Amino acid sequence: MASSHLLFLILLSVFISTTFSSPSLIRLPTGHRKFGLNDDLYCDSWRLSVETNNAGEWSTIPSQCQVFVQNYMTGQRYLSDSVIVANYSFAYASSVEIATDGKDAWVFDIDETLLSNLPYYARHGFGSEPFDEESFDEWVDLADAPALPASLNLYNQVKEMGFKIFLLTGRSEDQRNATIKNLLFAGYSDWERLILRGTSDQGKLAIVYKSEKRSELVNEGYRIRGSSGDQWSDLLGFAVAERSFKLPNPMYFIA
């Protein structure tokens, strides 16, 4: 018993000595410039908080992050992140047993999901400027937004699988013609329905508006198997999809 007690005291002493005298293996960041964090490290952590919905509502990117966001959006990282999301989406879609009644649905957002507005945001600071609805509407009317390549590939894959595709966007009904023109120009076709904000939808939060429109689909008997969007408000709320897939977008936030 004495030897066991002695062994316990020795082990306890070693534990206490190791715990309180050795440097921690994990060094937690405690701030930004005040504590020596460089902008890239801070902005990468900020981007993670945005994508995981921890940052909450925000109107513009942090001023010191414009170059970081520009490099991210115009570099390989953004394309790679989008491909990974599309790959997970495809893997899930492949696991769904498509029924013969034509009621298995996939819902896609449009802006920064199917179409990339990067040419517009490149002229407006990659999200460092407050959103200007008038200038963005002028951009939409040009119908020049290119397809996000990974999303175009996923779109065609789920279409070939037999999903009914619904496009649910926050764009207004008066932008229907320009939106259709742009989608076709970018390579999208054969969707089941394009849903835009009507008069009664104006002023609603995106999460409410999109939930209501998904609910209407459910009431029509559709099973929303999958949903893709760049905003959490595209995916959360009610009448949500069985699986939702969040695409990256550190340039703006929509509630």
Image (tube, helix red, strand yellow):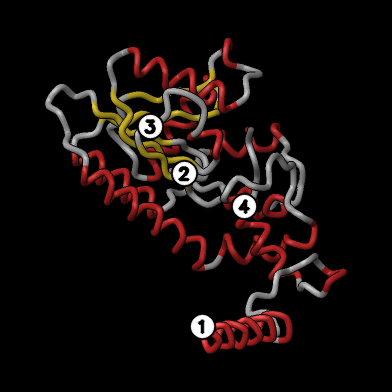
Q: Position of residue 84 (x, y in %)?
A: 39, 59
Left or right? Give the position of 48 relative to 35. left
- Which of label 3 and label 2 is nearer to you? 3
**Residue hosting label 3:** 241
Q: Secondary structure at mark 1?
A: loop
Q: How many marks?
A: 4
**Residue hosting label 2:** 113
- Which of label 1 and label 2 is nearer to you? 1
- State which tag comes first along the sequence, 1 or 2: 1
Report the front residue among 117 and 29. 29
Left or right? Give the position of 31 relative to 13. right
Q: What's under tag 1, amino acid-wise?
A: Met
- Which of label 3 and label 1 is nearer to you? 1
Pointer 4 local density, CA inside 10 Å: few below 14, some 14–19, many at least 20: many
Left or right? Give the position of 59 relative to 202. right
Report the front residue among 78 and 90. 90
Q: What's under tag 3, amino acid-wise?
A: Ala
Pointer 1 local density, CA inside 10 Å: few below 14, some 14–19, many at least 20: few
- State which tag comes first along the sequence, 3 or 4: 3
Q: CA distance from mark 4 to mark 1?
A: 63 Å
Query: What residue appears at the point 65 percent right and 60 percent down from the top-left corner?
Result: 69
**Residue hosting label 1:** 1
Q: Position of residue 248 (x, y in %)?
A: 52, 52
Q: Quadrant of the C terminus?
A: top right
Q: What's under tag 4, amino acid-wise?
A: Pro
Any mark on residue 56, and which? none
Q: Secondary structure at mark 4?
A: loop
Report the front residue among 234 and 23. 23
Q: Secondary structure at mark 2?
A: loop
Any mark on residue 250, and which? 4
Query: What residue appears at the point 39 percent right and 42 percent down from the top-left corner?
Result: 185
Q: Position of residue 174 (x, y in %)?
A: 54, 20
